[in-house]
Amino acid sequence: MKETGSVLHILGLDRFKITDLIFIPFFVAMYYKMEFFYQSMKIIRNVEIIIPLSCVIMALILIGIKNRFVAWVYYLALSALMFADVAYNNYYFRYLSVGMLRAVKFLFSVRTSVDSAVKSEFYWMFADAGILLILVIADFVIRRITARRKKLENDSIISCDNSDYHETTVLKKIAVFFTSRFSILLAMVLIFVIVINPMGNTTLKSVANQEFMSYHTKDVLEATGIYKDIEWKNELNGSIMKYEEEKNVPLFGVAKGRNLIVIQIESFMNFLINQKYNGQELTPNINRLLKDDTIYFDNYYQEVSAGNTSDSEFATNNSIYGTINSFTYEIYQDNHYKGLPWILREHGYETAVFHAYKKDFWNRDKAYPNLGFQRYDSRGDFKKGEKIGMGLSDEDMFDQVIEKMKHQREPFYDFIITLTNHYPYYMPYDKYNIELKKVDKNTTFGHYLNSAHYTDYCIGKFIKKLKKEKLYKNSIIAMYGDHTGLTKADLLIKKSMDRYLQHEYDYDVMLNIPLMIHIPDKKRNLEQKINTTGGNLDFMPTIAALMGIDKLDTFYLGHNLLYVKDNLVANQYYMPKGSFIKGDIIYVMSRDGVFEHGRAFDKNTREKIPLEQCRDYYKKSTAIINASEEILEKDKLRGKYEHYLYSAFDSPGSDTVKKH
C-alpha cells in the first residue's frame, strides 16, 4: 500500500514513470504557446512573471487529472477559450468576459465580421493541444503494451490494492481523494491568492488582471456576485447633473415642438468630416450640412459598453452608461427608465425606432418598450430591397423610413439606426466611389472609406427627401456615430491609419465620433462648432435644452454641451475602466488596472503628461461609471423612485429626494 502522506505521493510524483518523459515536448510547446498568446493579447506589463505562472498553473492542473484523455479534453477547451480571447481582443482590445456568453447566439448573424476579426495565425493556439493528443495516444499504447507484458504482476498489485482499499477507513478515503489531486488544489489556491490579493499588492493586481487563468477566474467570480471590486464605489463627486442651471443657454427652446429625427450612424468616425483623401472629399453631404444651421461637436467621444452599438443608443437616450458585464438590453431589459423617449412622450410626442435588421438582435424588441419607444420597425417591417453587407442598404432603408414618416402623427421622435457602414465594410464594386491609393486597396481602411462615403451619400439623399415631403422645416435632425469603425488593436488597420494621419493612431482619434444637430432656421444663423469635450451621455441634456424641455426629472449623468466649457468623458470599453478624455488630455488606464502603469498624453502635441495630473480625474471617471452601474443594478428609477425628482447632486445611493 502507498503511503498517502508522503511528499512524493502528495505531489503525485510517485506515479511518475520513465515513459512520462515523452510529454516534455508538449510542455515546451505550451511555453511557446503562452508566449504567443500574450503577445497576441498585446500584454507587456509583468509578462516575465505571467508566462511562467500560466505554465505552472496549467501543468499543475493537467498533472492532477489522472485520466489523460480527460486532461486533453480540458486543455483543448482552454485552448479554444484562448483562441476566442485573441480574436475578441483583436477588435475590442480586452479579454472576453463570461457575461458576453449571452451574445453567442448573435455570432452567426455577424459571421462576416467575426471571420474578419479572426486571423489565420490565431489557430496556433491549438498546436500544442494537437501535440498533447498525439502524446496521450502514444502513452496509452505504450502502457497497454507494458501492461500485457506484466499482466500477472499487475494483477497481483491490483488485488493487493483492492484488499487495502476495502480496509481503508472513510477518513483515509477522503485523504486519498484530496492528496491524489493535490496539484489541482495547489493551482486553485495559487489562483485565488492572486485574484483576492489580500495584501493589496500592486504586482498581484497587475497579474490578476492579465494572466489568463486568474483573469477568467476573477471574471466568473464577479459575474456570480461572489467577488466584486468596489474601488471608489461611493465617491460620486456630483455625478448626477443639474439640468435647471445648465438649460440656461441662448438656444434654449429653439426647436420646441418640432419633430426630432435622430440618426445613429454605424461605425462613423469624426476624422472623416471635412477631410479629403487622395484629393476626394470623404463626406461631401455632411460637410455641406455643417455650413447650414448645424451645431457641430467635434470633440465628441463614444461612451459604449459591452453592448457596443446597442449601448451607444442606450447611453444616448438615457444619459447612463451601459453595463460592462454584458449587453444592457438583455440583463436590464425589465428595468424602469426615464430617458428621452419617455420625456418626449410626456410632451405629446410619438416615439419610434427604425432599424432594418433582425427584430430580436441585442434583445431590442424586449428592451425598447421599457425605454419608452412605442413603435419598432425592424427587418420584417421593411420591403425587400438592395442588400449590402448585413442587410437592407442605407439608401433603401432611408427611402422607406420617409414613407413611414409621412403617416406619423406629429410631433414625433424617430430614432433611425443605419447598418451599411458595418465592419468589415465590404461593398459592391459599383459603389466604390473613392479612388484608393495602391497601398490602401483591399484593406479594411480602404473598404471603410468607401463604405462611409456611401453612407454620407445616403444621408444627403435623405435630407433632400425630407424637404420634398415637407418634413424638413418642422424637424430637428441630430446625427452621430455610434462607435469607432477602425480599431487600433488590429495592427494592419493601425498601420493604415498611422500612414493616413501622419502620426500614431491613438484613442483620441479612434474614439472620436461626430455629433451634428441640424435645426433648419433661416431667421438666425445657427451654424457653429463647439469644441467642448462630450460623449453619448451628454446628448440627452443637450437636445432637451434645444427642444425647450423645462426639467429632467430623472437620473442622468451627462451635461448640456451648450452650457459647460469643461467636461470629462469617462471610458470603460476599448480603453479600460478609469480612462478618460478631458479637453486635450487623454489618460489610458493600464490593462492591469494599476493607475501608475497608465499613460497620459496631450492629443495636440502628442507629448506625455505627468500621471499625477490625472489622478483626480481618474477617480471621477471611475466614480461616474460606478454610479451608472449602481443605477442599473439597483434599478433606481423603479418603485418609489419613479415618483420623485432627485436633487441635482445627490448620490445615487442617497435617499435624499424631492417630490415633483
Image: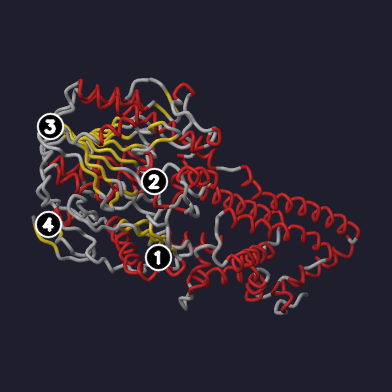
Residue picked out by circle 4: 245
Q: Which residue is mark 1?
A: 609
Crowding around mark 2 (Cα neighbors within 10 Å: few <14, some 14 to 19, many 20+) is many
Q: Earlier in the sequence, mark 1 or mark 4?
A: 4
Distance CA(mark 2)–CA(mark 1): 29 Å
User: Looking at the image, is mark 2 or mark 3 nearer the viewer?
Assistant: 3
Side of 160 relative to 378 (left or right): right
In the picture of the structure, the residue carrying the numbered disc 3 is: 522
Looking at the image, tell me whether mark 2 or mark 3 is earlier in sequence order: 2
Q: Is residue 260 visible?
A: no
Q: Residue at x 44, y 65 (%)?
A: 598
Residue 342: mark in rendering: none
Across and down, in percent, residue 320 comes to 27, 52
Amino acid residing under circle 4:
Glu
Q: Quadrant of the C terminus?
A: bottom left
CA distance for labels 1 and 3: 45 Å
Q: Secondary structure at mark 2?
A: loop
Q: Are marks 2 and 3 in contact (CB under 8 Å)?
A: no
Report crowding for label 1: few under 14, some 14 to 19, many 20 or more residues within 10 A (C-alpha). some
Say which mark, if any, is on residue 308.
2
The amino acid type, in three-letter code, at marker 3 is: Lys
* 549 sits to left or right of 367: left
Sequence-wise, which precedes: disc 1 or disc 3? 3
At label 1, the amino acid type is Ile
Percent of width and height locating residue 354: 29, 31
Marks 2 and 1, the one that precedes in the sequence: 2
Q: The N terminus appears in which quarter of the rendering?
A: bottom right
